[in-house]
Image (tube, helix red, strand yellow):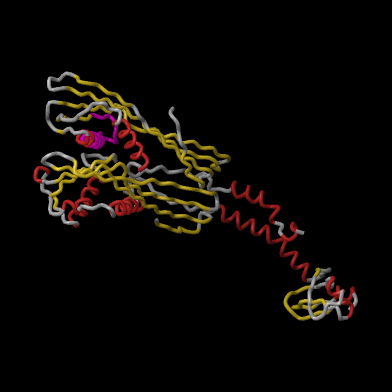
Amino acid sequence: MRKNEREKFRIPHFLVFSDPQSNGGCSLTKGRGVGYALVIPSKAHWAGEKKIFHSRVEWGNKPIMEKRKRAGQSFRWPMILVLILFLATSCATKRYWGPSMGRSADSQSTPADALQKALKSASFEAYRGKSLWIDVYTLTDRTGEESAEERFLRSWMAEKAVSQGSRTARSKAEADILLDVKARVFGVHQTRRDFIPLVYMESTQGVVDLHLTFYERESGKILQTEDLKGEARYLEYYILYMIGPFKSIE
Amino acid sequence: MTARRFPWQTQIPSLLFLFLLCSCATVDYLPPEQGTSAELQSILAQSLEGNLKEIEFDPAGKTVDIQVRALGGHQTPLGLERYVKSLFQEWAVRKGGKVGPGEWRMEVFLPVLGTTATRRDLSYRNIPLYYSERFRATGQLVVVVKDGEGKPAGIWQAGKGGDLADIYLMRILGPFDVPLGDR
């Protein structure tokens, strides 16, 4: 096959192998691919290597298919750009308007999870059968004497103590043990992250840091102190500000 | 050859620039609006515990009646006062004293216990490049101890604050905690 014939020869679905024993050092074999090829044997073939086929394919002038392909390529990038610009204008934003919507679900669930983690290691076994009076002190907002966090913590701690064999006293004067719970932290920390326009994330981190002090009521002495800490994180993210939310809880 | 096969490689900087100039850049960080934030509580607690260490009064063997008066707190100082009282009670008992009506009276004043937050943004065309939040807690503690006759036995002042700064780059990278020295 002459060179000019090879250039003009068009075979759909072919793969070209070079064969040093064939006429002109080339042969054509059906295989995968579409187009025109000029096949040049490698040096090893010129040296007379047999039965081992290597190929080096160079695209020659391709009158019909190549033109179509190039036309498609010239449209590809503007289309991708338009798609990116279209997606880039999307905008998913998680909204919470406090305080009219109440405390958001994320802000309730994360400190509650963190509290559960913190109290996992708490043990009231030493006070089994004894009556406890629990006072909780926090630095959180309040409108009255006791904040929502204090009420919740006091009840939760009482349940934990009762489940381990303690009793809750009817009044402070009747209690055997006074338990002071100082919550250095009982709340959430929220962070929003934006990498415009690819990713948008909202993370809510519940943090609990408690300091427990057990007093003997009669003597007023400290029986035991304990620090309990727990954290829980809830992450939501959106890809391209539109796709999501993808959620993760730690 | 490489440029022909991968023409997008040469367009990466311009594409990236287009990414960054896209809309939805005018986003606002929403600080915690739900209750007192965890960071705020943490920094206040640290400030209080730091101030407590500077009180040189020794309550060993004494019965001390503790009263706390504060100006701060959200809406009402009651929670803050109760928290500080509990802190002093534990401190007194741990040092060998007792808490209750007795011959010694300890008056704890908290003229200042609060935080200020500073936010810094560096942005170009509403694209945030650098963003930081800095919490500064200012705490002042005045402790007056009086004996049974009402005479002042000692006055102590403490003023330890707290400082916490978080830095974010492009609102996605971070927070980077920044150690801050004394100001």
- Between A5 and A136, the one lying in front of the other is A136
Work out whether A124 lies above or below B176.
below
Q: What residue is rendered at 21% in x and 33% in y?
A: B95
- Between B52 and B28, the one lying in front of the other is B52
In the image: residue A206, left or right of residue B149: right
The C terminus of chain A lies in quadrant: bottom left
Q: What residue is rendered at 22% in x and 54% in y?
A: A160
Q: What residue is rendered at 46% in x and 59% in y?
A: A246
Residue B145 in the image, given as x and y percentages of width and height:
20, 24
Which residues are the magenta region?
B69-89
Work out whether A56 lies above or below B172.
below
**Most distant residue in the top direction:** B151
Residue A244 in the image, given as x and y percentages of width and height:
47, 59
In the image: residue A76, left or right of residue A162: right
Res A62 → quadrant: bottom right
Res B92 → quadrant: top left
- Between A95 and A49, the one lying in front of the other is A49
Can the viewer see residue A38 in this picture?
no
**Most distant residue in the left direction:** A174
Can the viewer see residue A96 in this picture?
yes
Residue A119 in the magenta stretch? The answer is no
- Between A11 and B89, the one lying in front of the other is B89
Res B44 → quadrant: top left
Residue B135 in the image, given as x and y percentages of width and height:
41, 35
Residue A217 in the image, given as x and y percentages of width and height:
13, 42
Q: What residue is rendered at 19% in x and 35% in y?
A: B93
Residue B75 in the magenta stretch? The answer is yes
In the image: residue A1, left or right of residue B28: right
The N terminus of chain A lies in quadrant: bottom right
